[in-house]
Amino acid sequence: MYMVLLGPPGAGKGTQGEKLKDKLGLIHIAMGNLLRETVKKKTPSGEKVRAFMEEGKLVPDGVILELLKNEIELEKEGFILDGFPRNLSQARKLDEFLDKEAEKLDLVINLEVKKAVLIKRLRGRLICSECGKVYHKSKIDHSMEICKDCGASLLQRNDDNSDIIKKRIEVYLEHTHPLIDYYRKKKILRNVQGEGTSEKVFQRIMDLFKEKKIA
Ligand code: ADP
Ligand code: ZN
């Protein structure tokens, strides 16, 4: 199955992508994580990527497609994409890619979350420096800011500050939101209410499969 998780920053794409990966046995490709790994390498191209991300702007398509190609070629069973596509030209490129393989995208899950909730989630988000598990400042023990799963320290992402969050939401509305219509027209879009606990949201996604609302 070839699947895309769509939604604004903070909608929970990464969290649901991990849960779906375990459940469906597909690979989960998180573009943001691939980019952050690129940045860590401190190469000249990594430095360029960092500048775009720190400003909350989209990284140029060329870089994105190159990273994606390396990941996708390894996998034949299907994938769950998160953070890609983020604009119409990326969506068309994905269609072309699958077309060449005589495949097609099966499902796009659009996580719907109100702007105020997105902002609250992103401003309080803490991420495990080792395993990437996501926490929220309001829900952790502040005397012990370490990951429950692996014991590593929790960090705030550079782009999870108020100004950049605002910018990322603007970029989402301008470039990514039009993809909802793009996929609706292809009849593969399913909207899922993305508010509430991650377990609740995951249940809503699973319900779609049960109710056979998915082709
Ligand atoms: P979020 O969805 O919370 O914004 P991500 O980790 O998915 O977080 O993305 C972080 C940043 O990485 C984006 O703000 C953008 O700069 C860059 N990025 C991620 N995916 C793409 C993409 N498909 N195209 C261009 N830039 C991207
Ligand atoms: Zn951890």
Image (cartoon, rainbow, N blue to C red):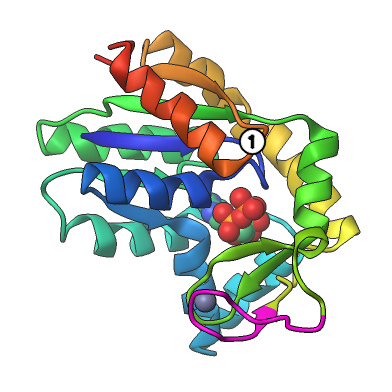
Can residue 83 be seen in this snapshot? no
Front-most of residues 146 and 127:
146
Q: Residue at x 11, y 49 (%)?
A: 76
Say if the magenta span includes residue 113.
no
Residue segment shown in magenta? 143-154
SS label for mark 1: helix
**Residue 15, above or below 93:** below
Image location (x, y in percent) of residue 81:
38, 45
Secondary structure of the magenta portion, mostly?
loop
Q: Is residue 101 left or right of residue 163?
A: left
In the rendered image, the residue lying farthest to the bottom is 42
Q: Is residue 147 above or below residue 138?
A: below
Q: What is the x, y in percent for residue 100?
A: 14, 37
142 vs 42, left or right, is right
**Residue placed most toward the observer, 113 or 167:** 113
34 vs 66, nearest the viewer: 34
Question: Can you name the residue that lies furthest to the right here?
Answer: 163
- Pinpoint residue 73: horizontal percent, then vertical percent: 17, 57
Residue 29 in the image, given as x and y percentages of width and height: 36, 55
Residue at mark 1:
175
Q: Quadrant of the N terminus?
A: top left
The residue closer to the viewer here, 82 or 61, is 82
Q: Residue at x 35, y 39 (%)?
A: 93
Specify the amino acid type for callout 1: His
How crowded pointer 1 is (Cα within 10 Å; few <14, some 14-19, many 20+) is rated as some
The answer to whether residue 209 is above or below residue 120 is above
Quarter holding the C terminus? top left
Q: Quadrant of residue 78?
A: top left
Q: Image point 15% across, 54% down: which residue?
A: 75
Q: Quadrant of residue 173?
A: top right
